[in-house]
Image (cartoon, rainbow, N blue to C red):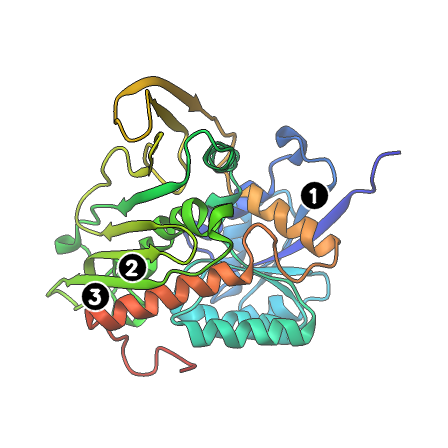
């Protein structure tokens, strides 16, 4: 007998680009990705005005009959909403997620989840107290290509990882955009680290932190370096190195920049028996190559295998399916992208900002 279909009813907070692509993906038929147990329904959208919310619905979800609200509070209090998707700037995430949880709603919150680790810890404590699901929207981790890389990385033929390089960069033309743009405004947590940094970090988590030999041990050291733009003082280029030495003997060398494009390959995971090379963009890659050496440590590639994946839509629906399945099953967090990983990201970012001398403006961080 087929399992009963569970439909998760979503409220969307904010109407910017990231909410647009997530909303479009929610409307794709789950059966097209071989998902038959959950479905998604958009029932409410909140913006700064009813007109703005209705325009969003008309343009991106015209067949949903979603209710338009001129405030986020309206979405939180809507009895038809099960879960809230938060697509606001990251310095607003703490207050938005707190209010959603206090209203009894499950939460999928965009990355970086908060401005700092204390804010995130406070949210996770609240979610636990309220018995509500909370997840960082780390969509990359749920994509089929990434799951396949994890399988290859852990099946043993490459050996254990030794060095991982990952970069996400983009030329934002910072000399010619307003200083109020999210990438330049320190009040919005601007700069490369909080905006782009989660993506190099997800690869470090996948390749090193999650590796079975690592036994979920956290990095034993973090070293960060920040180059600031004189335009607004946010970080224009940031690099950080994580050492994993408790069980592995491995290093993640991570970088992000807002002034130039990503290199290719943009992720390289190096083993004694070969390499895994991932082509950009690392947030939604479509191809990767595995190189095998003739003998350990030689560097002589004797075999290469390239895998290519294609997506209908944007690829955001995989994380939405995870949220629906977890909530249906009464889980408070995802086993694939659990709270420990989100905390790890925020603690690394806090330390890198501290070492780089990048403090957010007074009042931006709501919990210390």
Image coordinates for residue 132, horizontal then vertical, percent = 67, 67
Q: Which quadrant does the N terminus fall into?
A: top right
Residue position for label 2: 193
Q: Quadrant of residue 5?
A: top right
The circle drawn on residue 164 is none
Q: Residues within 10 Å of mark 3 (few under 14, many from 20)?
A: many
Q: Secondary structure at mark 1?
A: strand
Lower sequence index among marks 2 and 1: 1
Residue position for label 1: 39
The circle drawn on residue 234 is 3
Lower sequence index among marks 1 and 3: 1
Which residue is at the far top? 302
Q: Secondary structure at mark 2?
A: helix
Direction from residue 167 to residue 226 in the image, left or right = left
Q: CA distance from mark 2 to mark 1?
A: 34 Å
Residue 158 position (above or below residue 354): above
Q: Secondary structure at mark 3?
A: loop
């Amino acid at each position: 007998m087929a399992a009963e279909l569970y439909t998760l009813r979503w409220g969307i907070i904010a109407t910017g680009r990231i909410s647009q692509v997530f909303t479009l993906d929610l409307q794709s038929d789950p059966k097209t990705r071989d998902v038959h147990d959950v479905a998604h329904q958009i029932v409410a959208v909140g913006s700064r005005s009813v007109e703005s919310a209705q325009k969003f619905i008309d343009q991106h979800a015209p067949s949903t009959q979603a209710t338009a609200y001129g405030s986020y509070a309206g979405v939180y209090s809507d009895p038809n909403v099960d879960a809230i998707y938060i697509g606001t700037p990251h310095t607003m995430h703490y207050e938005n997620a707190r209010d959603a949880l206090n209203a009894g709603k499950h939460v999928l919150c965009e990355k970086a989840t908060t401005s700092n680790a204390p804010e995130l810890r406070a949210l996770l404590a609240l979610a636990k107290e309220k018995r509500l699901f909370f997840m960082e929207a780390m969509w990359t981790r749920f994509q089929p290509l990434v799951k396949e890389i994890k399988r290859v990385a852990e099946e043993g033929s490459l050996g254990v990882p030794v060095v991982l390089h990952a970069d996400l960069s983009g030329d934002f033309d910072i000399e010619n955009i307003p200083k109020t743009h999210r990438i330049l405004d320190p009040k919005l947590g601007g700069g490369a680290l909080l905006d782009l940094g989660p993506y190099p970090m997800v690869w470090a988590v996948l390749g090193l932190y999650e590796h079975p030999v690592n036994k979920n041990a956290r990095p034993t050291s973090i070293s960060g370096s920040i180059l600031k733009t004189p335009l607004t003082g946010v970080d224009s280029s940031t690099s950080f190195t994580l050492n994993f030495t408790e069980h592995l003997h491995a290093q993640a060398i991570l970088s992000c920049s807002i002034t130039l494009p990503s290199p290719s390959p943009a992720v390289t995971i190096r083993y004694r028996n070969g390499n895994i090379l991932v082509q950009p963009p690392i947030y939604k890659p479509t191809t990767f190559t595995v190189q095998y050496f003739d003998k350990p440590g030689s560097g002589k590639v004797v075999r290469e295998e390239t895998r290519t994946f294609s997506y209908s839509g944007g690829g955001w629906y995989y994380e939405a399916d995870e949220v629906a399945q977890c909530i249906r099953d009464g889980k408070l967090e995802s086993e694939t992208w659990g709270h420990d990983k989100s905390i790890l990201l925020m603690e690394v970012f806090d330390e890198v900002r501290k070492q780089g001398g990048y403090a957010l403006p007074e009042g931006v961080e709501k919990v210390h």
